[in-house]
Amino acid sequence: MRQFLLDNIWLVLTAVGSGTMLLWSLFGNRLRGVKEADIATALQLINHQNALVLDVREESEFKSGHLMHAKLIPLTKLKDRLGELERYRERPIVVVCRSGNRSATACAVLGNREYTQAYNLSGGMMAWQKAELPIER
């Protein structure tokens, strides 16, 4: 067994690295305290709890289509523009990006600043469009 590991160290390291990345993709957001919202939950938050929709994509992505009434603050500018969200501190915030990765990072930033009701839209705009829900341009 030891000789196999030594002979195939790069293969073993690749397998371990891949496994670690898979586990992080499955559990990383939970470990960071990020709340996930699927499409149905996001719709409930938006329609029944007056949630703010925060889009953290870049402006060009936003212009290609976004959720109705979404507020654009690109992830790269979020920390500098948190003051714009102060009045939403006690309301749910549904955070969206293209696939759900940048929005998860944004939710972690918001959580660290005590925005306790920030929800990452699982699957992002790709999931929203796959569900054939409306977008505005």
Image: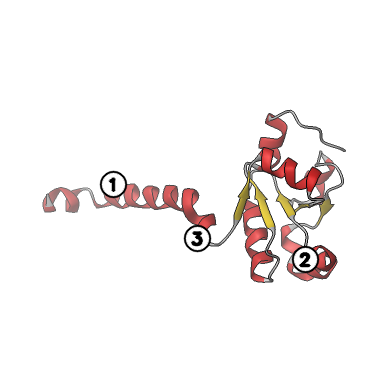
Residue type, numbered disc 1: Leu
What's the distance in space between the residues labelled 3 and 2, CA to CA? 22 Å
Q: What residue lies at 24% left-to-right and 52% top-to-bottom?
A: 9
Answer whether labels 1 and 2 touch (C-beta < 8 Å): no
Q: Which of marks 1 and 2 is nearer the N terminus?
A: 1
Q: Would you place residue 110 above or below residue 40 in this image?
A: below
| Camera-side residue of 78 and 33 | 33
As drawn, the label of residue 11 is 1
Name the residue type under label 2. Answer: Arg
Query: Picture quarter containing residue 116?
Result: bottom right
- In this figure, which colouring scheme has been used for the structure? secondary structure
The residue sitting at 50% across, 56% down in the picture is: 28
Decide: marks 3, 2 in contact (CB < 8 A)?
no
Q: Pinpoint residue 23: horizontal percent, then vertical percent.
A: 42, 50
- Residue lying at 85% horizontally and 66% vertically, measured from the top left: 87
Tag 2 residue: 89
For numbered disc 2, what is the local secondary structure?
loop
Q: Which of 48 and 1 is in front in this view?
A: 48
Where residue 85 sits: x, y (%)?
81, 64
